[in-house]
Amino acid sequence: MEYHASDNCTAGSKDLYKFYFSVMIIEFILALPLNLTVIYLFIFKLQFWKSKSNNIFLFNLVLADILLLICLPVRAYYFQRGERRSNNNTVCKSVLFMLFLNRGASIAFLTIISINRYLSVVHPGIKNPLKIRKRSVLISVLVWVLLMPLTIPSLLTTFECCNNNETGEETSSVFADNATAETFRELVFFTPVLISSIVLVYCTIRITKRLQEKTVGDRTKLRRAVFLVTLVVSVFAFCFWPSAISRLVLLIVRKENQPSAEEIAVQVYDGLMCLSYLDCLLDPIVYCLSSTKFKRVYISTYLPFLMRGHHAEHH
């Protein structure tokens, strides 16, 4: 069986992975209270299930971030030990499953939020509030249901050094039997990023064009929509494109069978995956700009002094 550096669970540079550990711990410390305050508001203050469709999609985005936060301490623990993943096969694959699920859900709901805003400002005539509200629940359920089978390949195949403690004969068999599943998994990794990027850019261009064409009437809603979709594209590009590009480079280097280059590519990929976890810190900005009501309730609940200052300016 051909050996690759990316099959090895031991970190190439222990100091570098300790730095990654520090980054993930900071992300966790900042993101956990932030997301807990957000989910509290959605459930107890906004009662998202009674609200407009966008709040339902935003709540699902919070759930995706919670999945990520469950995994971060586990990943950070092994990075601190100088290991890329747990040597325990069950822990290793469970964490990968949760990370893939979070990534897929974050991409899906960020895209849906942008499409929803695009439809409301560019094609307002087709919007029926009652139907959209019913569909938003159905769409959210479908996203999670579809993500489950798409994420399962991360559990079935030798991947990211999981299964590295199996015997050679067993591992060879796994590689041989799961070549198709590995190809499918890579398609699942790259396709959502590519398709969502195209959709987001399209929505941004169309909303911007609509703003430029509108010479009379309320342009504030359009400006807010342009800013929101541009922000989503920025968060998307910052969090997901670097890791996708680095994974593509890793696969190319692996194909060329260059062990020393592959070891560097693995470390860069792991680092940029740590960068992608920042989405759980950036998503709340999307919540505030997607819903003025959410922004108002969040500030009045947790930062009331800002509301007092705002009222004082108007009196």
Image (spheres, rainbow, N blue to C red):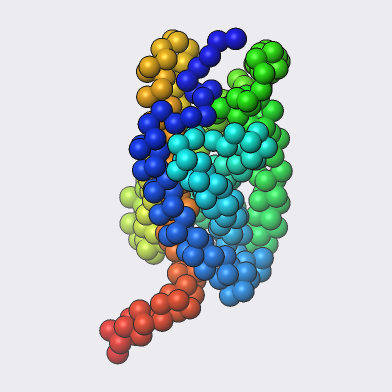
Q: Position of residue 305 (x, y in %)?
A: 36, 82
Residue in the foreground of this view, choosing between 263 and 156: 263
Asked if residue 314 is positioned above or below residue 118 in the image, the reply reads below
Q: Position of residue 133 (x, y in %)?
A: 66, 60
> Residue at the location (63% across, 31% down)?
154
Q: Position of residue 275 (x, y in %)?
A: 40, 43
> Residue at the location (65% across, 33% down)?
89
Asked if residue 217 is positioned above or below residue 12 in the image, the reply reads below
Q: Residue furthest bottom?
A: 315
Q: Can the viewer see residue 35?
A: yes
Q: Is residue 158 left or right of residue 300?
A: right
Q: Quadrant of the C terminus?
A: bottom left
Q: Quadrant of the N terminus?
A: top right
Count of numbered labels shown in the rendering: 0
Q: Can the viewer see residue 236?
A: no
Q: Position of residue 73 (x, y in %)?
A: 52, 50
Give the image quarter of residue 166: top right
> Residue at the location (44% across, 31% down)?
11
